[in-house]
Image (cartoon, grey):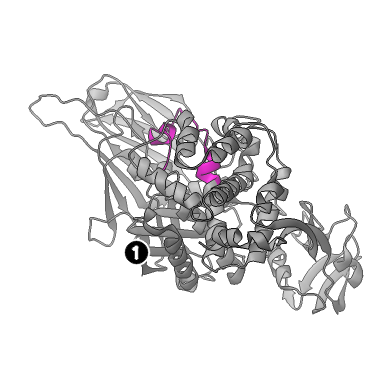
Amino acid sequence: MKKIFLAFTFATVLWSCKTANITTAISPKKEVQVSINLVEIKNDKVLVTVNPPTILTDKITYHLPKMVPGTYSEDNFGNYIDDLKAFDYKGNALETKKLDENSWSIANAKTLDKITYLVNDTYDIETEKSFGSDAIFSPSGSNIDADKNVMLNTHCFVGYFSNYMEIPYKLTVLHPAKLWGTTSMTDEDPSATKDLFVSARYSELVENPIMYSKPDYTSFNVDGMEILIAVYSPTGKITAESLKQDMKTMIAAQKQFLGNINTTKKYSILLYLSSMEKDAQGFGALEHPTATTVVFPEMIPKEKLSIMMKDVVSHEFFHIVTPLTIHSQEIQNFDYNFPKMSQHLWMYEGVTEYFSNLFQINQGLIDEEEFYSRIAEKIEEAKKMDDTMPFTTMSSNVLTKPYKDQYLNVYQKGALIGMCIDIIIRENSNGEKGILDLMQKLSREYGVSKAFNDNELFDKITELTYPEVGAFLKTYVSGPTPIPYETYLAKVGLTKVFEKIPGNIFEKDGKLYIAITDKKGEIIVNSNMELNVFFTNLGLLAGDIILAVNDKNYKSNTVNEILYDCENWKENDAITLKIRRDGKEQIIKGKVKLPTEEKESFKTNDPSKSALKEAWLKR
């Protein structure tokens, strides 16, 4: 998973237990059949019908997940289920009792014929929750918009019976002919209004999202792997074809970087673009073995979206390595309602994030300056977190405070841990090996169906690499000592420097110079901050209403776009603003003056280390 926090919020931004055999006149049913009706949607609710396997006990419990792999938060998907009913073979209602947020007990289960319930979507209420800690991360949530779009993350719609997770699931989806379902699963029904998907077990089903919308998709092949891109854009502003070339270039580079560690044959990218009006508010992506779901605002300019897609999709794609291939027992035997967390988020999310940046410099998609800037930014952000909290402790307790408040450090310090291990291995192997070699060895040692024991991983890594790597892990990953990043970067000839760079026009230290008026939804210059040079140079004052910039009007439903548009404004560009001051409209003409800020970065200063640096970045 990768969460993206964007500075526009004027709004306040796998498996167990088989069934026993019985001898009866009728062969017992050993599969779960599920039907989801997308044709008759009422009040943004979808009817789900579940036909169970043959139940051998007097009572059975049906669960929706509390949590799904890759999210690291308890989301309680059962809260979005309404009017759950159970019926016997004669159509009589059976007694049901809700045990907790996600579980229902059903009496006389030996006679159970079917369960029915309605599913609410999660996107509609994210604005109400201001996308806080109680909101479901959008890429793992659901959207139900009749005849337009259904983001069908299967774990939001389909649950499981206790002790019946290892049997096949047959999922039938009834849908309007004009809506096409994008997924990495194979549709086994040829009709235009019904899809049939068969999964070997529950965990396989929930790892396969489906997005139904008006067909906008494209595909291409990279080294024997089929890539499918589907886009839902409310206004049609962004198309799958417009993203194709950038995604093809990126994935070809990733495949080249990974080498034979990756054997995926089909991969789907499902992109949902939010209107931001009672719509998805949590932006980023969620990984699956053969797919990723991505959610971003539709207002993002195409060029900016391509960059963000490259970063988040590459991150999710690298999850193919870990945890989807290399993982602990806690992930192999994931419990959807009583989850236990692994100690090794530094690897699952951190090394994945490191790879998503390293491969870009390795394959020539970014230059050294950009790569060093990214590393410096991660160091700066990591220092804002609790730098003495052992990463393994945070990871194994990530579902509870105060540890959950440190989760975002997996993308900062977690990636830097991966970087330091990479450099240590390079130094000890004279540049011949790096952390990718380690991950290849681990994938051979373990793999999709063989998990490691959490408390044995560090010893295995040390055995496969060098004592220095083991010492680093014990001191800086499981220990409370902050990492001396400059020491490790010096090993590849880098030293810290300070540079003045253009700053953000409308934001500083997480605070915005502009806000949205409550009544009209207009852009107002903030009166609670000392204005920067952009404002003072143009003579803008606190309380001014910005109506238009360079003849582009900002209305109540498009005001956030100014935060993206300003990224294209360059120093000394001519600029014209229409404002309202003291109730009167006026035109202001002038030139753009960008605020500056001092940032840390790194430069090469030791030529004797150039060979090691080249091996680190390019080999």
Q: For the image shown, how many numbered marks are present on the structure? A: 1
| Extreme residue toward the top, this view | 58
Q: Where does the magenta region start and end?
A: 326-350
- For the stretch drawn in magenta, the main secondary structure is loop
Which one is nearer the viewer's eye here, 175 or 100? 100
- State which quadrant residue 334 falls in: top left
Q: Which residue is mark 1?
A: 226
The local secondary structure at tag 1 comes to strand
In the rendering, at what x and y percent does residue 201 appear?
29, 39
| Above-or-below relation of 263 to 204 | below
Residue placed most toward the observer, 505 or 124:
505
Q: Is residue 460 above or below residue 297?
A: above
User: Which residue is pictured at 58% across the width and 70% down the height?
Assistant: 302
- Describe residue 584's horizontal placement relative to residue 16 as left or right: right
The outermost residue toward the left is 25
Query: Residue at image x 53%, y 34%?
Result: 74
Q: Quadrant of residue 382?
A: top right
The answer to whether residue 239 is seen in the rendering is no
Left or right: where does residue 450 sit relative to residue 285?
Answer: left
